[in-house]
Amino acid sequence: MPTASEIRQQYIDFFHDKCAHTVVPSSPVVPHDDPTLLFTNAGMNQFKPYFLGTEKPPYPRAVDTQKCIRAGGKHNDLEDVGKDTYHHTFFEMLGNWSFGDYFKAEAIEWAWTLLTDVWRLDPSRLYVTVFAGDPDDGLDADDEAEEIWSRFVPRERISRWGKKDNFWEMGDTGPCGPCSEIHFDSRPDEEREARSGADFVNRDHPDVIEIWNLVFIQFNRSESALTPLPAKHVDTGMGLERVTRVLQGKRSNYDTDLWTPIFDAIRTRTGARPYAGGLDDAVDIAYRVIADHLRCLTVAITDGATPGNDGRGYVLRRILRRAVRMANQALGMREPVLADLVPAVVDSLGDAFPELRTHATRVAGIIRDEEHGFLRTLDRGIELFILAADRAVKDGSTAISGDDAFKLHDTFGFPIDLTQVMAAERGMSVDLADYEQRMEQARDASRKTPTGPGAVSLDLPPDAIARLKFMKAMPTGDEDKYHGRPTSASIRAIWNGTDFVERLVSAGRLERVAIITDRTNFYAEQGGQVGDVGIIRDLDADRSEFHVDDTLASGGYVLHIGRLRSGGLSVDDSVTLTIDHDRRQAIRANHTATHLLNHALRQVVGAEVDQKGSHVDADRLRFDFASPRALDDSEINGVERLVNLAIHQDLGVHARAVPLEHAKAVSGVRAVFGERYPDPVRVVSIGAPVEDLLADPTSERWAEHAIEFCGGTHLASSGEAKKFIIVQETALAAGVRRIFAITGAAALAADAAGKELESRAFHAAQLDDEALVVEFAEITHLVDELTIGAVAKHRVGQLLDKLRERTKRIRKAAAAEARNTVVDQARVLAEGINGRVIVDRILGADKETLRAAMDVIRAKRPDVAAMLLSGDPEESKVAIIAAVPDELVRKGLKAGDWVRQAATICGGGGGGRPEHAEAGGRNIEAIDDAIRAAHDFAENALA
C-alpha cells in the first residue's frame, strides 16, 4: 500500500518523466497581488496570469502539488468539516497544466493512463462527467470531451451535468471553462452489483466520490460578460487526501496516513479515547475538526496570514475558535492544546513543504496566544449561549435570537458559524436575519464605491489584451525605465476603460485614460514600488500635454494613466515621455534603503526575520517582517546604525539580469517567499558587483551585502540616500511587525528635530514653574506634529513622563489659586446684588470653577436669578451657567431658555432644567452683548 508521500511523488514523476512537464513548487496559500481571493483555493491560482494572457508562461506544461484552503469566499468547505469523511479546509491539489499547448485529448488520455496503468485502479469503478451546456450563457455541451472519453469508458458510465457541477470558475471573476470529473466507486461488490455507481455520481454519497477534475479553460468571466481567452489551456486538479484514501483502500479520508499521526498526537496530548471514525460521535467529530483546522492554521500562518478581525484573518480566527471549542467541550481541555500539536502537522507535511519546519516555533506561538485569548471568554460565552437557548425554548422558539447571537459575537468573540454549530447540536437554528441587522447597525466601516469622473478601472481585461495583439501592438519596451531620461516613443493605443479610441481631444476634461506607447521610460507599479508620474508631449508640435499621474502594467503593456491638459493626441503620434525626476530620485533612495533595512534587520534581530511585504513611494518606505515581538530601542538604533554606515560608505548599487537558477545559487540572496520571479531574474547587489557573485556564488563574503531579486529602480550608490531614520515600528498582526522609515532631506530634518526636542525636554527640568508648564505643552504638541525618529520620540516621551507629575502639581496649584480668586469675585458680586436678577462676567474661570462661583451666589442670595459667563482666550471658548429659584421659574423665567439666549449670541448653544442650565459658545468678543441680551431677556420674562 503506497504512502501519501509516495502517491504525491508518483503523480509528479508521471507528468515530469512521461509527459514532459516542468515541476513547479506550490505557491503560498496567501495569494500575492490577487485581491479577489482570500486564500489560494485551487492549483490554478498561481498560473492565473498565464491563462489571462497578462504574462508569458516560462514553460508550456507544468505539474505541482498546491497547498489550498477553502474556507470563506465562493469555495468554502468550512461548514462540512467534521460532519463527513471527505471535506477539508486545507488540502493538497495535485495538478498538471497546459498553457496553450495540449488540450482535451492528451489531458484525458494521460489521466486514464495514470489511474488505470500506473495506479492500477479498477476501470469498472471509474465514472466520468462532462458539461451539458448552458443556453443562458450561450455555452454548448462538451461533445468533444464525451467523444474522447468514450474511447476508454463505456457510454453508460459517462453522464452530462450543468454549470453547477461541470463548469469550473475560480471566483466571481477570472478564468473559467467546462470541466470533466472522474469519480471513483469504492462500495463493496455486493452493493455495486445491486445498483450502478452512476446513480450516486454528484449525489454526496460517501463512497462514490470525485477524485480528479479536468478543467478546459477557454473563457474569462468579467463582471459583465463571458469572453474567450486568447488561448486554450488545461487545468487539472486531484485532491491528494481523496486519491490517497482510494489507493490505500480506505472508506474515509481520515483513515489514511495523512491523518493518523495527527490523531495520535491529539490522543496523547488530551488523553481522549482513540479515534473510532464515528460520523455522529462528538469525540470523533472533534478529532476530525481539530486535525483539519490545525493543518489549515499551520499552513496559513506559515505562509504569512495571521488571525485577526478582517478578511482572511477573521476566517483563520473563526477556524481556530471552532477547534478550541471542540477541544474544550468534546475533549474536556481547559487549557491551550492546539499549539502543542503543531509539530505533528509539521512532521506530516514538512517534507513536501519545508517552510513549515522553518516557521514551526513562530506558528505555535501565534496559535497559543490566540487560544489563551479565546479561552478567557469561552466559558462565559457558553453560559450565555445556554441561557439564550433555554430562553428561546421557553418562548416556544427553535431559533437563537439575532440579538443573543450578536452578543456572543461582539462580547465573547463567537463567530456566527460557531453559534450556528452549537445551535444545530441542540436541534436549533439562529435568526440570521435579525443577527445581520444587528451587525449592520454595528458596522462603522462605510461602504464607499468609487463614483464620478475617473472611477472607471483602467486595467486591461483579457479581451482588451487579445485585441491589442490582434491590432499588432507589441508589448511595451521598458528597457529605458532604469535610466529615466526623456524617451521618444510612438502612441500605439489609447484605452478609456471600456474601449480603445483613436484620438484624445477636449483638453481639461476630467476623464482619465491610459496611453500605451511602443516604448517607455516610466516605471510601472510592481514589486511594492509605486509607478512614475510625469508628462507626455507631442514631439512634433510640442503643444499637446498629457499629465501622467500613475503608471501600471498589464499583459506586457505599460499604461500611462492620466488626463489630457492641452491640445490633442492620436494613435501613431510621436511623443516625448518625461518622468518627474525629483520624485523618481526620492523613490530610488527609499527603495535602496529598503534593501539595506532588510539586510540590517537580519543582522540585528536574527535570520528568522522574513520579509512579508513592502511599499516604496517618494515620501517614505514601509517594510513588513516576521517577528514575534517589538524591536526595542537598542535594536532600532542598531538597524539605523548599519543602514547609515552603508550610506556613509557610499557603496555601489549593482544590477544585472541573471538566469534564475544561477541567481538562486548565490549565498545570502534574499527573495520574498511565494513571489513569482521571471527567468532571467534581475539581481540587485549593494556593495558587490553581480559578476563577482556569479564567479563565486557560495562565498561567505556575500552575507555582508544586501543582495535581492528586484525589478525596481535604485540609486547608483548608497550615499545618495544621505540619511536613514526609522520613524515608526509597530504591530501589523500577530507575529508580523511593520516599519516606516524615511531617507534624504526628510531624514536629516527628522534627525535634527528629534535631537532638538530631546534637548529641550532634558533642559525643561531646570525651568521655573510657569515656564515649565508652557514648555511641557509645546514639546508634547511638537512630538505629535513633527516627524522624528522612533527612538527619539521614545526618549522624549520618557523625559516628559518625568516632568508630568511636576507639571500636574503646578497646574493643580494654579487651578486652586484661580478657584479662590473666582470665589472671591463671586462673593463680591453676591454682596452687591440689587434686585432679583444678576448677569455678569467672571474672569479666569472654566466651567467647573464657574459652578463653584454660582454655589457662592446661591448660598448668599437664594432668591436671585443668576447667570455667570466666562471666556477662555487660549481655547476660544465661552462658558455660561444659570440658576433660577423656584419662585421665579413659576413667574416665567426658565434657566434653559435663558442660557440658550446668551449662548446663541456667543455662537454656541446649550440648555437644561428650568432651575439650572449650562451652555457654551465660541465667540469671546460677544460676551458683553450676551450679558446685555440675557439681562433684558430675564427682566422681560419676569415683567
Image (cartoon, rainbow, N blue to C red):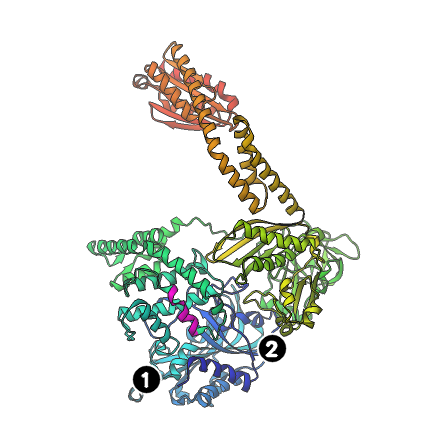
Q: Amino acid at mark 2?
A: Tyr
| Residue bearing mark 2 | 59
Q: Give residue 492's position: percent from left, percent from top.
A: 70, 64
**Mark 2, other Cα within 10 Å: few <14 / some 14–19 / many ≥20:** few
Q: Give residue 100's position: percent from left, percent from top.
A: 58, 78
Q: Please determine whether, in this image, residue 190 is positioned above or below residue 278.
A: below
The quadrant of the picture occupied by the C terminus is top left
270 or 504, which is in the foreground?
Answer: 270
Q: Give residue 738's position: percent from left, percent from top.
A: 53, 54
Q: Tell me which segment is drawn in magenta.
A: 339-348
For residue 709, say whether it is visible: no
Left or right side of 95 for 190:
left
Residue at the image position 38 percent from the left and 62 percent from the top: 320
Assess whether residue 882 is covered by the magenta stretch: no
**Precedes in sequence: disc 2 or disc 1:** 2
Secondary structure under badge 2? Answer: loop
Left or right side of 914 for 769:
right
The quadrant of the picture occupied by the N terminus is bottom left
| Residue bearing mark 1 | 187
Q: Residue furthest right?
A: 540
> How much space separates mark 2 and mark 1, taking CA atoms?
41 Å
